[in-house]
Image: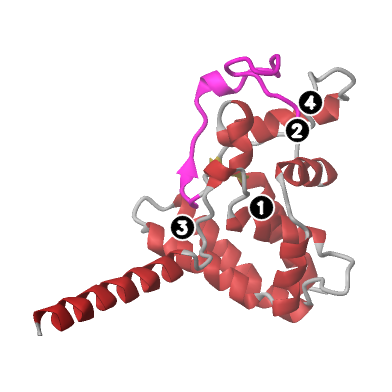
Amino acid sequence: MKKIFLAILLLTALLVSACGSSTSNTPNAQTNPNNGELPQVTKLVLGTLKLDGTENAVTPEQAKDLLPLWQVYVSLLDSDTAAQEEIDALINQIGETMTPEQNQAINDMNLSQQDMFSVMQEQGITSGNRSQNSSGTRSGNSSGNSGGVGPPGGGDGFAPPDGGGGEGFSPDQIATAQAARQAGGNGFGGFNRTPNALIEQVITYLTKIAGS
């Protein structure tokens, strides 16, 4: 009888462990930036802008729903009392407001740090004063992070996304690189954060679409 009881306990423990593993693999708003993957909020920002002009572009009706969500998101980042759970829930709600086809199209883009750099350049974003980090919280810039582009691998320097040393970059490209670096601190780690200017660009874009 004891052996049967112990066997049942062991089976129960295994089932609980399996359920826990399954739950931990469920995607959520907080993508781990340490593995080089962009945060979910960054993917939504870039994806929304890159969907423009495609069959999956945001519609005027969607824009009217998405616009207040992004505006509230910015307000939460500005708030000293907003809980991280609120921010994560809002990111998830923004994703759920997009259609399954739009979300799939964004996933299929396999967005990377290079894409963020390119979109910033396309949108004319050449300066940034603050950012929100990978988990959606605010991040200020210290005066030490406002310097120019340094050599790759150097402490505060910015290494271009293609791994080059910066030779041949135009002034606009260098300014964009500085904006991305300022958005997330020193070096390549900055690309794991979403520049506030990109979020503002999405709000501007949705405002235009909602009024069309």
Lower position in the chain sequence, tag 1 or tag 4? 4
Lower position in the chain sequence, tag 2 or tag 4? 2
Lower position in the chain sequence, tag 3 or tag 2? 3
- Look at mark 4 in the image and give the residue it sits on: 174
Amino acid, disc 2: Pro
Image spot of residue 103 (x, y percent): 70, 70
Separation of residues labelled 1 and 4 (CA atoms): 21 Å
Q: Nearer the viewer, residue 46 or 198?
A: 46
Q: Quadrant of residue 55?
A: bottom right
Q: Dot 2, how many residues are within 10 Å of its Cα: few (below 14), some (14-19), or many (20+)?
A: some
Q: Residue at x 79, y 47 (%)?
A: 119
Q: Quadrant of residue 104?
A: bottom right
Image spot of residue 58 (x, y percent): 77, 72
Q: Are marks 3 and 2 in contact (CB under 8 Å)?
A: no
- Look at mark 2 in the image and give the residue it sits on: 161
Amino acid, disc 4: Ile
Separation of residues labelled 2 and 4 (CA atoms): 11 Å
What SS does tag 1 mark?
helix
Q: Which mark is residue 200?
A: 1
Q: Are marks 3 and 4 in contact (CB under 8 Å)?
A: no
What SS does tag 4 mark?
helix
What segment is highlighted magenta in the picture?
135-160
Lower position in the chain sequence, tag 2 or tag 1? 2
